[in-house]
Amino acid sequence: MGFWARLAASDPAPGGGLQRLTIFAKGNLDVRDTLHSLRMGGEVRWNGINAVLRERGAVARIRHETLTRSDALLSVDGTVPTALAERDPPLGAYPLDSQFSQAVFETDAEVIAFSIQPDVNANLLRHRRDGFLFYPNDLSIWPAADRAWLREHFIAEPPLSLSASMDNFERIIARIRKRSTAPILIYNLSAVVPGDQVHAYEGLEESFSTRIRRFNLGLIELSQQTGVSIIDVDAVVARGGADRLKYDALHLTGEGCRAVAEEVARVLDDLGCLTDAEAVG
């Protein structure tokens, strides 16, 4: 959805001497809810990472864009395909300018954050003629004519394999490194899936929790090869308890968002981002 936002309700007081940094977050609810805010039923359940950073003498500004998948990000050129621009379908949190943005490769932010969530979970469509990838968010509220157009002009793309995902992220990191030395953080996922009680896997297809575990391990190998930092959501949830920190397979509670934000702050501090940031006041 592409916007600049202060994460706290007010700016730091003049003379407060807080360190300031900008984080470009290219991801979905896990990065948005933990870094920006979590609202449910009109109520703010978590008001963002600045509640944690201020305790460390810093304040963050976030630029957030949703991410459909790593393969889609690598394929865009910054322009919305004409076939989609002419329809302008209702896409909610995944507007066309975000789906086809190259901004993460052009940002001067001090920190860049991603998540493997889209690669684990998202199913995309491919345009039959032009070949571009597309995520038809909020499809249930599309007009009937637009849904018929979608069926006529797009085909389903298979789920992304682990090897393809990690290869894509390696290419994304290399592309960012051509112009930026900013630390890159990548969120993994909690492998706790409510209702998952499987204890014998013979003859079963890959479960969602198993897929998460495989991608989490792949991310460790990616970190070994590239030096990116992992925000270990899986470990944070395991320490705090999934029943308390998660609503469902993918969504965190307000307590869960705070716990992950504290981990992000710890990693930023460890990387020197809070002491090297520009002073405010």
Image (tube, grey):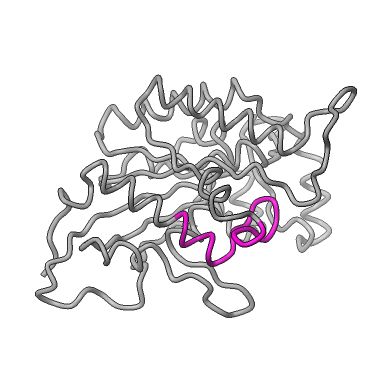
Q: Position of residue 33 (x, y in %)?
A: 51, 61
- Where is residue 35 shown, x and y percent of the image? 43, 59
Comparing 89 with 156, the one in front is 156
Viewer-proximal residue among 41 and 89: 41
- Is 177 positioned to the left or the right of 27 in the image? left
Residue at 87% x, 27% y is 204
Residue farthest along the right direction in this orientation: 203
Q: Is residue 14 above or below residue 90?
A: below
Residue ID at (39%, 56%)? 262
Span shown in magenta: 243-260
234 lies left or right of 152: left
Residue 177 x/y as whole percent: 30, 29
Residue drawn where x is 67% and y is 41% of the image: 121
Asked if 169 appears above or below 92 in the picture, the reply is above
Q: Quadrant of the C terminus?
A: bottom left
Q: Position of residue 87 (x, y in %)?
A: 66, 54
Quarter assignment of residue 241: bottom right
> Which residue is at a point 16% across and 51% down the rendered structure image?
275
